[in-house]
Image (cartoon, rainbow, N blue to C red):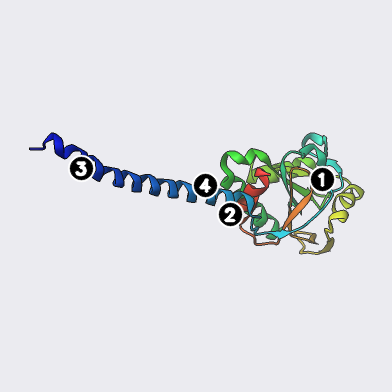
């Protein structure tokens, strides 16, 4: 039976335990806050090749679905993934589009802050209707752009995109040898990252999360 005289001793034993508990909780909170602070302040490590562009990519106008003109600057405020290819491409283009679809799916609700644009390097065969059907097969949000040869050159040359026709089979007629990189533009329209062919959608998505937060 505990007497009144023993109660202060019990309380004194509890106080050191509570003090230690408060200290441990404080340390845990401090470490968590410190980790979050370092995560936000430290420069991110990107999977793509970093490009330190100081100015936005030169604007261009091409033709979208329904024959409507589309400007690159229409997408300011979003992270843009630019890919130059063509719908008749037998391997590289569809493989790249699959990875871009994966990247967008990985972002979940944040996908609304990203726009994938595929620019055709084969305007002869890629009409707006053909291109729209092709890109939306991979994801309904993807946009395909085409135009006359001069417009394609104006949209590709400043970014160093190379392409040329080469002889194909009797069935294909011709194929197009082209640069197969994906370009990531930030919300200000500045070129930030380059992804070589074969970069996974998961790696692209990890980088996009950083660009979306900026």
Gap in angstroms between the C-alphas marked 3 and 2: 60 Å
Gap in angstroms between the C-alphas marked 4 and 3: 37 Å
Mark 3 or mark 2, which has the lower sequence index?
3
| Above or below, 71 relative to 119 | above
Residue at the left extreme? 1
Q: Are marks 3 and 2 in contact (CB under 8 Å)?
A: no
Q: Are marks 1 and 4 in contact (CB under 8 Å)?
A: no
Q: Report which quarter residue 15 is drawn in.
A: top left
Mark 4 or mark 3, which has the lower sequence index?
3
The numbered disc on residue 9 is 3
Q: Which residue is mark 2?
A: 202
Q: Are marks 1 and 2 in contact (CB under 8 Å)?
A: no
Q: Which residue is mark 1?
A: 146
Q: Which residue is mark 4?
A: 33
What is the secondary structure assignment of the residue under circle 2?
A: helix
Q: Position of residue 154 (x, y in %)?
A: 90, 50
Gap in angstroms between the C-alphas marked 4 and 2: 27 Å
Mark 1 or mark 2, which has the lower sequence index?
1
Instruction: Out of 162 and 122, give the one closest to the viewer.
Output: 162
State the residue at coordinates (76%, 59%).
Answer: 172
Label 4 CA crowd tier, 10 Å (few <14, some 14–19, many 20+): few
């Amino acid at each position: 039976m505990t007497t009144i005289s023993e109660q202060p001793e019990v309380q004194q034993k509890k106080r050191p335990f509570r003090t230690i508990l408060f200290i441990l909780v404080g340390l845990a909170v401090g470490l968590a806050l410190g980790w979050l602070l370092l995560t936000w302040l430290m420069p991110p490590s990107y999977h793509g090749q970093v490009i330190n562009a100081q100015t936005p990519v030169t604007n261009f106008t091409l033709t979208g679905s329904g024959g409507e003109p589309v400007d690159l600057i229409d997408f300011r405020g979003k992270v843009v993934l630019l890919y130059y290819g063509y719908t008749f491409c037998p391997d590289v283009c569809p493989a790249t589009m699959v990875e871009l679809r994966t990247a967008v799916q990985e972002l979940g609700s944040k996908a609304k802050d990203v726009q994938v644009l595929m620019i055709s390097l084969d305007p002869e065969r890629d009409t707006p209707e053909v291109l729209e059907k092709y890109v939306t097969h991979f994801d309904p949000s993807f946009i395909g752009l085409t135009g006359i040869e001069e417009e394609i050159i104006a949209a590709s040359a400043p970014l160093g995109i190379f392409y040329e026709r080469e002889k194909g089979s009797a069935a294909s007629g011709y194929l197009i040898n082209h640069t197969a990189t994906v370009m990531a533009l930030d919300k200000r329209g500045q070129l930030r990252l380059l992804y070589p062919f074969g970069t996974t959608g998961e790696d692209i998505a990890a980088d996009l999360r950083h660009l979306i937060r900026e």
